[in-house]
Amino acid sequence: MSYLLRVILPDRPGSLGMLALALAEVGADILSLDVVERGGGYAVDDIVVEMPNGALPDTLITAAEALDDTYVDAVRPFTGSLDTHLELALIDAVAVARHDRLQVLANGLPRALQVHWAVVIDGADGTAAHLAASSGTPETWPSEPLGVHCSRPVALDSEAEWLPESWRQSDIQLAAAPLGDSGRILLLGRNGDPQFRPAEIARLGYVSGILATVLK
């Protein structure tokens, strides 16, 4: 069974090596790693590990947090490996698609940006109409247009009153970005932690900016 860990650890030589040893001691095999964010003396890393059959993910948390100043922000099942070049592959796929380019975009965003689902929305529409949606998108939907909440790339408040009650109860983490000046909006969702980091929002902004040009 593979898991994706988001780990916050000291940004100093040897920290990642110590973490790798601690995870290996509980039978975890590191498959891939992506540095999400660095600053303030800490690094935020996404690590995909393979665990033996029957091993509990809680052992990963215990092993990591036994190290000084190391904290597991989230752990969840994950298939495959991290690939920081998936954004470029997605942009290329959208650019060459002859039909349903928005659907190609929605289908590819979850894997490229490590989220559970993605939607392209008409931000100016009063019913927040879907233009395209990936699998796993919630059935309920906000009744007001999202354009007023995301004039720029942003992590949205998951407890905001304008969100459906079922979303607030499920602790869905949300990020959004406009697709240029088209009125269309990318909305990304995680069904629970981890929350979106500032570096992830910046990454979303870069990707949405390029996609806005491609989709013109």
Image: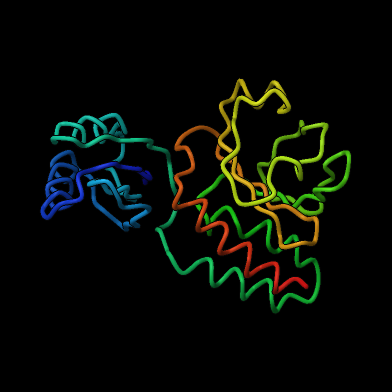
| Residue 197 left/right relative to 13 | right
Please state which of residues 88 and 51 is positioned toward the viewer in this rendering. Answer: 88
| Residue at the spot 25% in from the left edge and 36% down from the top edge | 60
Please state which of residues 80 and 69 is positioned toward the viewer in this rendering. Answer: 69
Q: Position of residue 154 (x, y in %)?
A: 59, 46
Q: Quadrant of the N terminus?
A: top left
Residue 95 in the image: above or below residue 14 = below
Q: Position of residue 156 (x, y in %)?
A: 60, 37
Give the image's coloring scheme.
rainbow
Q: Position of residue 74 (x, y in %)?
A: 38, 36
Q: Quadrant of the C terminus?
A: bottom right
Please state which of residues 40 and 69 is positioned toward the viewer in this rendering. Answer: 40
| Residue 90 left/right relative to 55 | right
Residue found at the far bottom of this picture: 96
| Residue 16 left/right relative to 2 | left
Number of marks in picture: 0
| Residue at the spot 88% in from the left edge and 45% down from the top edge | 125
Q: Position of residue 177 (x, y in %)?
A: 65, 52
| Residue at the spot 48% in from the left edge and 52% down from the top edge | 200
| Residue at the spot 77% in from the left edge and 55% down from the top edge | 184
Residue 18 in the image: above or below residue 172 = below
**Residue 178 occupies which quadrant of the picture?**
bottom right
**Residue 96 occupies which quadrant of the picture?**
bottom right
